[in-house]
Image: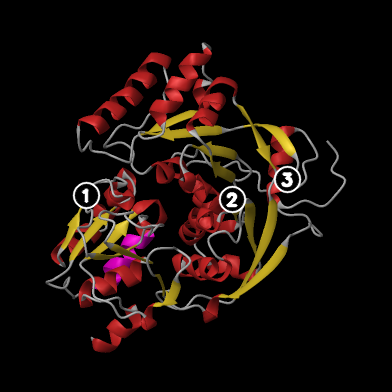
Amino acid sequence: MTPDHPKTISEKILSLKSGQDARAGDIVEAEVDHVMVNDVTGPLAFQEFEALGCEPVRERIVLIPDHFVPNKDVASAQQAKEMREFAKRWGIVNYFEVGRGGVCHQVMLEEGFAYPGALVVGADSHTCTYGGINAFSTGVGSSEAAAVFATGRLWFKVPASIRVMLKGRLSRYVGGKDLVLKLISDIGVDGANYRALEFAGSGVAELTVSDRLTVSNMAIEAGGKAGIFPCDGATADFMRSVGKNDITPVHADEGASYERVLEYDLSQLESMVALPHLPSNGRKARDVDVSIDQAYLGSCTNGRIEDLRLATEVLRGRKVHPEVRMIVVPASTKVFEQALSEGLLAELSRAGAFISGPTCGACLGGHMGILAAGERCVSSTNRNFIGRMGHRDSEVYLAGPAVVAASAVTGRITDPRDLEVRG
């Protein structure tokens, strides 16, 4: 395959996986490295696969119960049972039982199923998270996942790309969540519809891998097919930490074609909050003055060890407001154990936070912290749609971990810099 035009990262990966000179707008059939389903999307995929009457591509399938775990009722217990039985029936070794896994996207990263240049699909919209480590990853439906179970392949429409140029350095307490909330507020929830958001520029090096994963995770909130970063030393260090020492980075070609170019100076960013009921309703945290009932720290967006460290730093020496409940949910068993060994969970608990084991929990309004009518929650999750975390008359304000922690202390949406001024 000899390319005849400069390519974006997405075009390159889909060219490599399809064996075609893939350009934006082309339809290609490509080899998928891994396909993931969870306890909600898995049962339908299993049903569709069984109807095909064939053997699965076992080594590429990853099964991760996470949405309703531990099971909250009989229906969720049945879903989890179906996943467990499918794994046993077909000898799927990449099955992560409760207590040995966590939120699906974090587990996919920790276990090395996503890596630079990989093509990964998952029956969950936030599968785009893995673009933070230079993979092309995207969400699919359960029936498409079943097709990959059977063939290891899937068709894709190659997305056009929007280039997001970053420069400058982040201020204290400002991170990837603030960048992506600002980006979505600028372009809207359909501003990247079926596009790949490709990040570049000197500012990329100023973002931790955790920050990049947060940004890529929420590409779907702008309608994006993928959110993808280049591979650099930080990426390589992360991959080594999960046992992947041999990686093949994919970089955009000079002269690649982009639908549009956006520019952000990281030094100009401030702590952001997205008001109900869209992730695009971004405001500076300092400009939002509302009381809260709950502060939620966790999810595939901001439940990593870096997020727990930052929240603990903000809370250190302080207490959760007496009229606020704070819920902390590490994204995986490994994150939980690391936070435990670093003493973070003990500090958070002493501050008045409730600590949960890994689960999607209240992020999708499942359990472990859903909201009653009229309640407000500041949350490090990725969506604040009507009824997302509970009653349709509740409100969710999206923010990064520092804002969540600062707001838990004051009982109102708070920029953590202002908390420091108060002492």
Give how far apart the Cα atoms at labels 1 and 2 are.
29 Å
Task: Tell me the chief SS of the magenta region.
Answer: helix
Q: In the figure, 184 relative to 301: above or below?
A: below
Does any portion of residue 230 appear in the rendered image?
no
Residue under label 2, please give it: 226
Amino acid type of the residue tagged 1 in the rendering: Met
Q: Earlier in the sequence, mark 3 or mark 1?
A: 3
- Indicate the position of residue 276 as horizontal and vertical percent values: 37, 66
Determine contact: label 3, label 1, CB under 8 Å.
no
Which mark is in front, 2 or 3?
2
The stretch drawn in magenta includes residue 307: yes
Amino acid type of the residue tagged 2 in the rendering: Ala
Labelled disc at residue 12: 3
Residue under label 1, please give it: 368
Q: Nearer the viewer, residue 215 or 376?
A: 376
Q: Secondary structure at mark 3?
A: helix
Residue at the (51%, 32%) spot, across then down = 35
Write the start and end of the magenta stretch as one range. Answer: 306-316
* In-image side of 236 versus 420 (left or right): right
